[in-house]
Image (cartoon, rainbow, N blue to C red):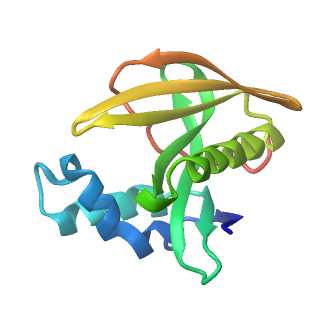
Amino acid sequence: MVALTVTYRDPGEPMAGREIINQVLDATPEMYWQCSREEAASRIFEAAEDIERVEIEARDESGRLVGYLTAGDDDDPNVGPSLGIQHLYVLPEYRGTIGVKLISAAVDVARKANYQIVGYTRRKGEGRFELRYMRVSKGVPCEEIKEGGSESSRPGKHRRTR
């Protein structure tokens, strides 16, 4: 069994993803095409840890981190204010339902904070990403509204209330 935990973090607080950054980098070599693995990890940490954000962690019975999602306020150039998912990673042996649960939890966070849209990038292969948006409806499952492109939503300041 895997348990999800939603935590609001302030700038400067370490991100949960530090625990599995080596697995993240093993799975996404494009993150260090232009720099060392250490520099890529540092860039990931800085982008997340410099902002107020929500982190959703998935941990197994032993407490091991098996997946995480980091999201923050985003003034997306395509759709305007949204909850932008910066990072989402699930260990290979937990993929499938855990990723869906992490995104569903992010949509719940967005709904409670009165966001109308959740934006994220979906990795399609090495160096290939797809930009996606989902509408957030009150009490209704999320609905995907747009896909395509190759830009990721940039980090912003997460709004706890709007």
From the top left corner, tell me how far across and down residue 17 is, in percent.
46, 66
Residue 153 shows in this picture: no
- In the rendered view, does 64 fall on the left or right side of 30? right
Q: Is residue 104 above or below residue 32?
A: above
From the top left corner, tell me how far across and down residue 86 is, in percent.
47, 46
The N terminus sits in image quarter: bottom right
Residue drawn at x 43%, y 75% is 19
Q: Is residue 150 above or below residue 1?
A: above
- In the rendered view, does 71 fall on the left or right side of 33? right
Residue drawn at x 34%, y 60% is 24
Residue 127 shows in this picture: yes
From the top left corner, tell me how far across and down residue 3 is, in percent.
70, 67
Q: Is residue 31 above or below residue 3?
A: above
Number of marks in the image?
A: 0
- In the rendered view, does 102 fall on the left or right side of 34? right
Hey, which residue is sitting farthest right in the picture?
A: 139
Which of 84/75 is in front?
84
The C terminus sits in image quarter: top right
From the top left corner, tell me how far across and down residue 130 is, in percent.
39, 27
Residue drawn at x 22%, y 36% is 127
Residue 54, located in which quarter of the rendered image? bottom right
